[in-house]
Amino acid sequence: VSIAKVEVRLPSLELDRSYRILIDPDEGAEERLADEIHRRAGGARIGLLTDETVAGLHWPRIEGALTQRGLRVATVVVPDGENSKSLGRAELVAQAWAKAGLDRKSIVVALGGGVVGDLGGFVASVFLRGVPYVQVPTTLLAQVDSSVGGKTGVNLPSGKNLVGTFYQPMLVYADLTTLQTLDARDIAAGLAELVKHGAIADAGLFELIEQRVDAARAGDPGFLAQLIARSCAIKAEIVAADERETAIDLPGGGRARLNFGHTVGHAIESASAHTAAPLRHGEAVGLGMLAAARLGAALGLGDRTLEARLTSLCHGLGLPTDLDRWLTAAVLERVTVDKKRAGNRINLILVDRLGSSLVAPVEPQRIGEILLGEKRR
Ligand SMILES: NC(=O)c1ccc[n+]([C@@H]2O[C@H](COP(=O)([O-])OP(=O)(O)OC[C@H]3O[C@@H](n4cnc5c(N)ncnc54)[C@H](O)[C@@H]3O)[C@@H](O)[C@H]2O)c1
Ligand SMILES: [Zn+2]
């Protein structure tokens, strides 16, 4: 037998995948956004993806600014909510884009929250084997978190984000005027991820939020622009060092450190989903950060003052702080099946001092003992 061997060599820098995040707090942002897209589009078609709510609130002026520049825009509207992150919906979106005549030069624009961003990014990454896309995030969570970093995905019946790609956008344009139509709870939920970025990587950001809690909570556009820019810079730096979340050995835990507060947070989020008052993702992450702070202190690895400081900040921001109420056996059971398990341990992200994180592999049982034990005291 003579086995033929063919070497496949891929250039190390296939293409330039760097891109900009523009954060625009002023009125008329749609005009500047449309200029950015127009400049990149040439004569190509634009595929605009949005959901029903955003279509009613923000689509008209953005679509208007695009068509005013002579761009041909095909809009696809999906129903609101997490259910639109499905393979079935992805197929319908791709079909609509094909029908609208989008080609490989077309630019896809995802206008909406994390759901539209994750779905739009996913379909953009596979439609015609990849078309360029622009994220126009319209929730605070999407502006500080989901629009940055290139994770796309849809859910399966057996779990969230189980099908997806790493696919970086060509541009992220945060039009802060879109936040005016969000309710206070959605602002607070987005602020939780900002607090997270401060806690794990930027003490100054954390302190800035502490100093102006009321301005943050009120969604003051100038102040939010400052916070969002700083927060995106942190996430971008973490992602650049570990795009695919494979380098947990990097100082601080690589991209995995962005999961601070999410191990217990996700468990609380899913437990709350079936109650009369489901928590927003960010609200659950706030509680999860309190749990992580408590675990860190009990393990002798984390900042001892963090739980109190986080509790007071979350309280000021209008986030729930009633962690003990959520620490039930059912929630802790969910923690132990968390996907971030390594062998029989869970890689917990802890904050050793404000603005710095570390990874601690902990036995699931120990997490339960500490959290339930502390609760009883
Ligand atoms: N890709 C990532 O790295 C990443 C990171 C974090 C979260 N996510 C994903 O993000 C999703 C959650 O994102 P989300 O919280 O933005 O939810 P979402 O996209 O469902 O938006 C929440 C609700 O707000 C509405 N909405 C959006 N913009 C609005 C506006 N400006 N005014 C009024 N209403 C508006 C939407 O129609 C929706 O009903 C989850 O699916 C999560 O998995 C992804
Ligand atoms: Zn999150």
Image (spheres, rainbow, N blue to C red):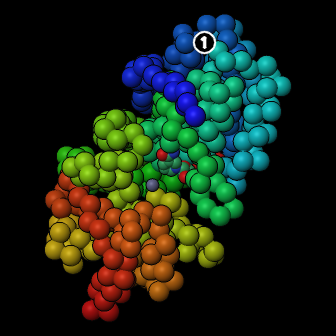
Closer-to-camera residue (271/36): 271
- Residue at 65 percent across and 33 percent down: it is 126
Q: Residue furthest right?
A: 99
Mark 1 is on which residue type?
A: Ala
Q: Is residue 196 above or below residue 330?
A: above
Judge by depth and name the residue closer to the eye, 63 or 57.
Answer: 63
On the image, the x and y values in percent for residue 110 come to 61, 33
Residue 186 shows in the view: yes
Q: Quadrant of the N terminus?
A: top right
Number of marks present in the image shown = 1
Quick check: is the Cβ at mark 1 less than 8 Å away from ligand 1? Answer: no
Q: Residue at x 70, y 55 (%)?
A: 83
Q: Work out which quarter of the rendered image holds the C terminus and state it.
A: bottom left
Q: Secondary structure at mark 1?
A: helix
Question: Does any portion of residue 173 appear in the rendered image?
Answer: no
Residue 376 rendering spot, x and y as whole percentages: 32, 92
**In the picture, residue 237 is in which quadrant?**
top left
Judged left or right of residue 37, residue 371 is left
Compared across the picture, whether 117 is left or right of 312 comes to right
Task: Residue 318: name its quadrant.
Answer: bottom left
Q: Which residue is mark 1?
A: 41
Q: Residues within 10 Å of mark 1 (few under 14, many from 20)?
A: some
Residue at 27% from the left image edge and 74% from the top image edge = 294
Q: Nearer the viewer, residue 301 or 49?
A: 301
Residue occupying the point 51% across, 83% down: 330
- Quarter of the view holding residue 144: top left
Instruction: Establish if 355 lies above or below 151.
Output: below
